[in-house]
Amino acid sequence: MIYNKEKKVLYSAIQPTNLMTLGNYLGAIKNWVKLQDEYNCFYAIADLHALTVTQEPADFRAKALSLFAQLIACGIDPDKSLLYFQSHVPAHAELQWVLCCNTYLGEAYRMTQFKDKSQKHAENVNVGLLAYPVLMAADILLYQASLVPVGQDQKQHLEISRDIAIRMNNKYGGIFTVPEPYITVGGARIMSLQNPEAKMSKSDTDVNATVELSDDKDTVIRKFKRAVTDCGAEIVAREDKPGITNLLNIYSETTGKTVAEAEKEFEGKGYGDFKLAVGEAVADKLAPVRAEHARLLKEKSVLSDIIRKNGLETRAAADRTLVKVYKKIGLVPKDNK
Ligand code: TRP
């Protein structure tokens, strides 16, 4: 990472529960790529967070590695940013314990995602599920991050991270930078192709609802041809036209044209032509990403070198904060100084 003292630290992470969808890419990762020039960026594969749900080990490992390569293929530059696996930095789990001792049970129980997940996985409501936001706080606070780009579903977790940081700063004297949410200007929410009222989600069971970044051209186009549209024939972004609005947003995010420009471009055209054009634009955009992803997965030693080097660099950065925290809270330093 090229660390620049003048620039703020920005932190974000993605769970390796699945490979990336077009929604992840356009909604978050494309923005991560842009932010690299403006901030010192730490980007993690949140593999420890993913353990709150039982994972099949071989499949989990393959997905995590593939996602790492996919992020690089998307433009996360290992020379600019620190892309790493959360599990490669023991300080995350270590700081989490300290933060757990400074988080009230009531606060943790109040998290809406904890409530939702406890209902959804009623057979496995583990302690990790409750501590999930505390681990997230540890992620962010370890690197003294000022900014955290998160989606709506993670806002409450960022809020609790801030509360924990402020509480500990008051108790022990400034330890942590208090993080702020990074709000993206523009950047549309990408919705399911089959139900434009719901976010495009990698856990959707309907394969036609989601475009995977690894989908080939034919698959992408087929999925767009099958996309649900709305009544009428006009191609405009409007509240009563969620399907067409979603497709216009996807087209705009993919091509860099504004939604208004896209509306003009397709004025008088039919839904069929429009859906084909969106599919083609997306397929063209994804083709080089797919090719680079495949190349990286084949070049195992290049990937291993990045993983090893970034692990080392991240551990060094994280340890600086951990040593500071341990000292502030009164633990005996390793060198007894
Ligand atoms: N919980 C986040 C998600 O599922 C991923 C995540 C883990 C994260 N640690 C983070 C996001 C720290 C931002 C900052 O999307």
Image (tube, rainbow, N blue to C red):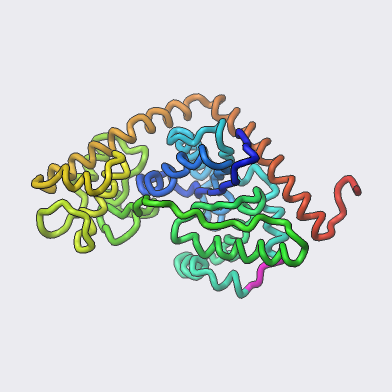
Residue 310 appears left or right of 327:
left
Q: Position of residue 276 (x, y in %)?
A: 18, 41
Q: Residue furthest front?
A: 6
Quadrant housing residue 70: top left
Between 65 and 94, which is closer to the camera in this rendering?
A: 94
User: Is the stretch drawn in magenta largely helix, strand or loop?
Assistant: loop
Viewport quadrant of the N terminus:
top right
User: For residue 227: magenta?
Assistant: no
Q: What residue is rendered at 10% in x and 58% in y?
A: 232
Question: Residue at image x 62%, y 52%?
Answer: 139
Which residue lies most toward the right here? 336
Span highlighted in magenta in the image? 101-105
Q: Residue at x 38, y 28 (%)?
A: 291
The residue under the point 87% across, 54% down is: 332
Q: Is residue 2 above or below residue 204?
A: above
Coordinates of residue 161 in the picture (x, y in percent): 60, 61
Q: Quadrant of residue 160?
A: bottom right
Measuring from the top left, give residue 14's x and y in whole percent.
Answer: 50, 48
How many numbered marks have been drawn onto this rendered protein structure? 0
Q: Is residue 55 left or right of residue 312?
A: left
Q: Is residue 98 above or below residue 1?
A: below
169 relative position to 1: left or right: right
Residue 318, how many percent across, how many down?
Answer: 69, 45
